Each structure stands twice: as C-alpha cells, then as structure tokens.
Amino acid sequence: MYENKKQIGQCLMFNVFVERQMKKFAVIMSLIVAVVLVAWAAATMAGPDESPIRVGVILPLTGDLSKFGNIEKNSFVMGLEEINAAGGANGRPIELLFADDASKAVTGRSAAEKLIEQDKVIALTGGYSSEVTLAVASEADRRKIPLLITTGSADMITEIDWDYVFRINQPISEYSKTLIEFFQEVLELKSVVILHDNGLFGRSGAIEFSEQASALGWKIVLQESYEPGTLDFKPLLTKANAAKPDAVYMISYVNEAALLLKQSKELNLTPKVFAGAGAGFTLPAFLELAGSAAENVLSATLWTPQLPYPGAKEYYNNYLRRFGSATDYHGAEAYASIHVIADALKRTRELTPQGVREALVRTNMMTAFGPVRFISYGKKRQQNSLPTYVVQWQKGVLETVWPAIIATKPFVFPSQTELR
C-alpha cells in the first residue's frame, strides 16, 4: 500500500514537471515564430537584396608596371559604370575592390588573402605580371574563389590543373605565332637575336619564340636575358650587334623597351627589323619614352580598336576622351573582363563562388576584346582562344599591318629596301 502511494506521488510530480516543460517550450516556440514573422515581414517590405556584390581586382598600381595597372584600372572603372548604370547584376550593383600588388608575388598573394578573407569578395580578376598572377591563381584555387585573369600570360598558368582559374587573354605562346607568320610572308629572315626580361613572362616568351623560329630553320645567334630595372643595355646590345642578326626580338616592359631602342640607335644596331612581344611596345608611353627610336618598330599585339568587335572602337574613343590618352590591348582586356564577370553574376544559379565558377564555365559571349569562351586545348584549361596581330609605329601612330585584311597601313621596311 505504501509503495503504491509513493509511486502515485512520483507520477503526479512527473506529470507536473512535464506540464511545466511543455509550457516553457510553447513560450519559446511562440517567441521563435514571432521573430521569424518579423524578419519575414521586414524582408518582404525591404524587397530584394540591394547590397553591392563585391569583386576583387589585383593590379600593379604603383612601381615600374603602374602604367599598365592604371590603364587597366581606368578600363575596369569604365566598364563597371556602364554595367551598374544598366542595372548591375539582376538589380544589384557590383563593387570593385582594387588592391595594389606592387608587381611582387608575395604582395599579390597577400592581397588575394585579404580580399577573400576580410572583404568577402565573390570573385577575383586582374593579374598583370605572370609571377604575381601565378601566385594569386594558386591562392584563389586553394580557397575555391574564381579568378578571371586579365593579362598574366605565361602558358603554364592555365596548364596547371586548377578548377577556379580562367584566362581571357591569349597566352604568351600565341604572341609570336602571328608575328612569325608575318616574317615568313613579308621578310626573308635567317638569323634572330632574342633579348628578354628575366621574369616568368620574358623567359616563357623567349622559349616559345626560340622553338617556333628554330622549327623554321632560323638561326638563334644570341638569346640572353636581363634583370628588370636594367638601365644600361649597351654591353648586351654590343653583343647583339656583333651577331649581325636579321631581326632583334625583345620581350620587355615599357621602360626597358624604350631604353633598348634608344641605346640600339646610339650603337648603330641596324637589323632588318626590331620586333617586340606586346607588353611595353604597344603603350603610348613607349612612344613618349623612346622618341624617334620607336619609328618602324614592330610588335605583336592582342587587340586593336580597328577590330570588328562590337564596342571596340567606342571603348577606345571613350577612353581617349575621358582620360586624355590612348589605351591599348591591356585596357581592352580589363574592360572586357568586368563585362564577363558581370555576365557570370547575372547567370549564376546561386550567388556563391561555386555558382560564379559554374557560370564562368558556361560563358559564351562577345566583348569589345573579342569572343569569350573558356575551353580546353593542348595542355590548357579554361582558356579563351583568340588570334593575335602585328602593329608598327609609323610617324607616331601605332598602325595595324598584319593580317592584311585588317591592316590600317602597309608595313614600312625599316631600311626602306623593297619587300620581296
């Protein structure tokens, strides 16, 4: 009897405990529901998210390569203003966060880390020098943040098995193909001197040109590098002069490019032709620095405003009008890059880095720089494929001379001898 009374008491106490807990749970659930309803109501009244979508841009904005970096920054800003004026990405504005890599790989990597970790960007773009671009690409892929490369052109960058790295511009191996084709069609070359910057861009380009030229039976009579920032090229150019080459091919940034030509003129180095691998030879600053030594210099280029791409001429004219100086292929790459990023943001199924990456994979669009579609060919992955062109400085103007179908002027032979 006692045990029954004790058990009944325990049951009653348990029932009271359960009832109290249920009341507490009901109060908590009511509060949760109220909070959810308030949040839902606030979201409904506020409409869609209108906060900016952040994209990081890494460029050399100070130092020796800042001329390139600032042309690209100006072009990114021009493109961004057009995109946001047209509604941004599905009604949300895009915000570009610029970071200066100072042309140093370690600085570029740190900039990528900050943009990803602290600034919470959804994607990265930019990348000028190949060393910096390689470091940024490694960091972006490791952290699974899509990177659209604008300029860094060493072939190996898109030959590494990276899922989050894309490149809009042509690799360095493509720079010399059209130039060599032009040499074959117009000039009779038998010997070549190759002078190049000792960075990744210069080394890669020299190897590619040497292999392509040697395959045609041309003799490489001298192939030497120099350190970035070199001021006195006369010892190197004296060796080049002694080799008596038909052509001197140079892979240089703008300051060194101008010095090479000026000092070549002082030493009376007179090959049939001087030719550059884009980079410093197509910038308006090259003409300013080299002066008369720039006359008749050839260069590979990745773009000209005369190309029949929608918006190409308009971009060039708008840049000239706004900034008071000409742009070149570097600016066109940047201008196109932000349009490609915006297109991917509009098409992404999910506004996450993974979603943007999947949208970039499906990209198939036309830009002022040309068609953009990321494909695999040879050893390359997620690489855009475009032709290259040949330009020549003629009376202070950079004229397109090859292919003939888009030439703005015929080629001028430097020594004024007849073409074959």
Image (cartoon, rainbow, N blue to C red):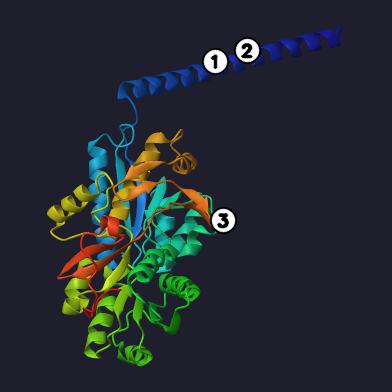
Q: Amino acid at mark 1?
A: Ala
Q: Residues within 10 Å of mark 2 (few under 14, many from 20)?
A: few
Q: Which mark is residue 105?
A: none
**Image depth: mark 2 or mark 3 in front:** 3
1 vs 3, front mark: 3
Instruction: Please name whichever residue, 192 or 353, is drawn nearer the observer in this view of the structure.
Output: 192
Q: Is residue 211 visible?
A: yes
Q: Secondary structure at mark 1?
A: helix
Q: Residues within 10 Å of mark 1 (few under 14, many from 20)?
A: few
Q: Is residue 412 left or right of residue 58?
A: left
The Cα atoms of the two marked residues, 1 and 3, are separated by 55 Å
Q: Name the mark on residue 161.
A: 3
Percent across and percent down for residue 193 are: 39, 82
In front: 41, or 125?
125
Q: CA distance from mark 1 to mark 2?
A: 11 Å
Q: Amino acid at mark 3?
A: Asp
- The percent coordinates of residue 55 (x first, y second) are 36, 47
User: Outermost residue, front direction?
Assistant: 420
Q: Specify whether 337 is left or right of 36.
A: left
| Circle 1 residue | 26
Nearest the camera: 35 or 412? 412
Label 3, residues with CA under 10 Å away: few <14, some 14-19, many ≥20? few
Three-letter code for the amino acid on which mark 2 is drawn:
Glu
